[in-house]
Each structure stands twice: as structure tokens, then as C-alpha cells.
Image: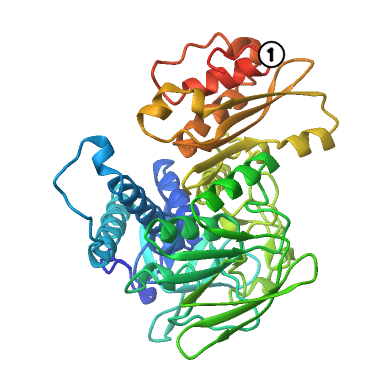
Amino acid sequence: MATTAPAQTPASSTDTLYDVAIIGSGPAGYTAAIRGGQLGLKVALIEADNVLGGTCLHVGCIPTKALLFNAEIWDHLKHAAEYGIAGIGTPQLDWTAVLKRKTAIVDKHTKGLGFLMKKNKVTVVSGFGRLTGPAKDGIHTVELTATDNTKSQLKAKNIIVATGSEARTIFGLKPDDRILTNIEILDIPQPPKSLIIVGAGAVGVEFGSIFASFGTEVTIVEFLPRAIPVEDEDLSKELTRLFKKRGIDVNTSCKVESIEKTESGVKVKWTTAAGKLIEKEADKVLVAVGRAPRTSGINIESTRIEVNRGFIKVNEAQQTAEPGIYAIGDIVLGLPQLAHVGSMSGIVAVSAIAGRKYRPVRHDRIPSCTYTDPQVGSAGLTEAQAKEKGYEIKIGKFPFAGNSKASIVDSHDGFVKIIADAKYGEILGVHIIGPQATELIAEAVAVMELEGTIDELMFTIHAHPTLSEAMLDAYAAVEGEAINA
């Protein structure tokens, strides 16, 4: 984790009245703080840790994707001779250097956040923030607890709660050097020889992809019937097929019965859909069964905020049932736990506070990205969801095997799938598995925001040779007119 912290105001010296106090400095919180400063608000950003950035920057999105990039380079080096790179011999993995690079990236962006706070005149306040109830005479009070347990108060006209989430555990297990969450696995001293991953959501399959590249024997166990279960079923099938091709053992519709330590590793037992009990040992186990909202301990019960399973209910402006208190990011009921969603919800909340125009977060316009090999990117309705909503649909599918750039970059597995309304041709959903899917999906979101239709998109020129041409062919495939298929 990064050790360089921005200058913070001690909890005892916060007697200023702020327009908004933000509790939590993850992507949701720091984005709201920056936009608040841009809009001329007096902003306090409260953070209990000694660094800004939250889970995403320090033990989530950024370090994980840094490792994924290393894994991609490593996979390419295995085939160096095919690319005309000779004389390097057998590549040797320097895991210490891998971790050093990951940490350097985190440190760089941590420093960047400190600079952005100063640039936008955001006061960073050190301490654990707790709510104290409704506003009095239009002023809210946040109780601050410093690292030495001394307490003070901060006054603000509005409060935004952005406390984020944490990894869920099972069987009451406590993370250590063998039973891992997303935090511990980022700093293991060497890739394990074998790893069992419980959960095939984004976290599980990303770490499975990383360590399979580095030679680890990876086993994934998922309770639901398919991997990446929130995605379109065709993407789940393709990722499972390609994972198995890479030697990753994917087990779905399986219930984990127990996880226990052995003399030198761990033992996991699970029951299959057919009722068969499977027992497997590995060096380590990664528990990746979802994330829980961090809403306990902040004194929500002193307010009228409505909570469901720890998640906070909000309206379109991200406002809770308590006037003047907003909630953003992973703690919001029904909001996908994605950093970019948290950031946008922060922009919505602070825009509402500033009296500016805003657009509520639309759940059908959220890009979902999984950075495995191959990558997965999606937006809008899945095929099943579109049918459930009563749409008459047309589907276009184009394989990356027919895309020239995919051949050039030696990554031609996967496809683009377009779901369109049959009557009007409007794009309802886009689902991509293949090279740079997490980048290509941005086009789909823009198209859907502008209510683009197949008729329009079939005549939208895409540069050649590019991966984005696969989008053009997929649009045309809806009408059975893909050029390269």
C-alpha cells in the first residue's frame, strides 16, 4: 500500500462551516470533493486512513489491473520467438519487481490525489467520521475520532456518506497468509503453486486469470450456475470455455461446505449440483464472494436514513431520507459496486447540493468491465433481461476471429454481441468478450446514451484496421449483413 499521504487537517482544528462534508475518500468521495471544489463549494473530505483513494486505489482496481497487465506481458513473452524476439532465453519471473511496479503505480496516483485536493481547495480532514443525527438550524455535525481516540466535531450544511465496502467472508474465517481476500493476495511473496478461488464474479475470475498466467494451478468454485453471473449468458459460456482452455478448473453450481487449514496449505470441500462431495487441497484459498457495505459504526441509527441489509436507500439525487445527508458509491442500495458508478453518483450528489443540473445514474447505461484474459465488457440489457421486459429483439454477433487487428495483436478469441429492438432498431445491450473489451464498451455506452439505432450505426465509419471494426460488423450482423463474417 502507498505510504505517501497528502497533508491533512487534524481532527481538532475543524471549526469551519463547510458547504459539504464527505465521509470517505474512495473514488466516490474524492470525485465528489473535486467536483464540489470546481463548483465553488467549501468542501471537507474526511478520511480515517493515512492515505486517500480507498479500496479501489490501494487494494482494488488499480493494483489488480497493474498485475493483470504484467500477466499479459508475461503471456506474450512466452511466445517471444513468434514475434521475432530472439536471444532472451527462458524468461524468469521476478515477482518482487512485479510487486514493486504495482506499488509505484499506486503511490503515483495517491500523490496525484493530494495535488488535486489542493488544486480544488478541498480540506482533507484526518479522522473517523460518524453521524450525530438530524441537522440543527440547518447545520449538520460530524463527530471525528482521531487515531489517538481524541474526538472533535466538524460542521457542514450537507453530508455525503461515501464509506465504501469490504470483502465478505464465509464460515467466520479470518484472513491470513493462506486464507486470502483481495487485500492479502496483492502482497503474497510469490505466486502460489496452487490456488482455490471461491467465487467466480469479477474479483475471482480476475485473480484466476492473473495467477494462471504466472503458472499457478487455479481452481474456481462458484455457487451459481455460471461464471460472471451478472453478465449475458453467452459471455459466461465463452469465458468458461476459454478459461478451461487455459487450464483453469471452473466448477459452477457448487456449494462450498468447508474451508480448513492443513499442515502446509488449505483444504476446500464442496458439493456439486449432482450431490457429489469434492475435496481439494491447495497452497492458498481466495475468498471472493462479494463485498459488504461499510455502514456499521457510523451511527446511521441516529438519523432517518433507511437501510436494507446495510445498504442505504437514496433518491435520484443520491439523497437519503434524512434531509441534507446523501449517500454514494458501494453503500447505495441497488447501485452496482463499481468505482466508476461511485464516481458518477458523487458528481450527481454534489451537483444537486450546488443547485446545478444533473442526470441521475441510469442503471441501463453503466459499463461493466472484467479485466481477465480475454477481457469482458458490457452495457445495457442482457438477452434474457430484454426478453423478460417484453422486447421483440434482434441479435447480431461477430467473432473477433474475423477482425484483422485481433489477428495482428494475436488475440482473436471471443465476440461482440449486439441486442437491438426489432421494431425501432435501438441498441438495448452490447456484450463483448475479447481483446480490449473494456475499452471498446465505451463506444456502446455513448451510442446507447444517444439512442443510436442499427440503421445509423451500420453507416458509421470505423477506422481500419482496428478492434473497433468488430463493433461495426456486429451492428451489421443484427441485419445479417456483417462484412467480415
Q: Nearer the viewer, residue 309 or 39?
A: 309
Task: Provide residue 465's location: percent of width, then percent of height.
Answer: 38, 19
On screen, residue 340 above or below 90:
above
Give left or right: position of 319 versus 41. Answer: right
At which x and y percent is residue 278? 67, 74
Marker count (numbered): 1
Q: Which corner quadrant of the image does residue 333 belong to?
A: bottom right
User: Residue at left 28%, top 47%?
Assistant: 77
Q: Hey, what amino acid is under mark 1?
A: Glu
Viewer-proximal residue, 434 or 340? 434
The residue at the point 60 percent across, 11 percent down is 456
Report if residue 47 is visible in the image.
yes
Left or right, 70 with respect to 304, comes to left
Crowd around label 1: few <14 · some 14–19 · many ≥20 (10 Å): some
In the rendered image, the residue lying farthest to the bottom is: 263
Q: Residue 10: give x, y in percent of width and height.
A: 34, 73
**Residue 157 in view, yes or no:** no
Image quarter in which the N terminus is found: bottom left
Where 178 sits versus 203, above or below? below
Q: Quadrant of residue 219?
A: bottom right
Q: Which residue ends up furthest to the left in the rendered image?
A: 87
Q: At x 39% / y 62%, what residue is drawn?
A: 215
Camera-nearest residue between 404 and 468: 404
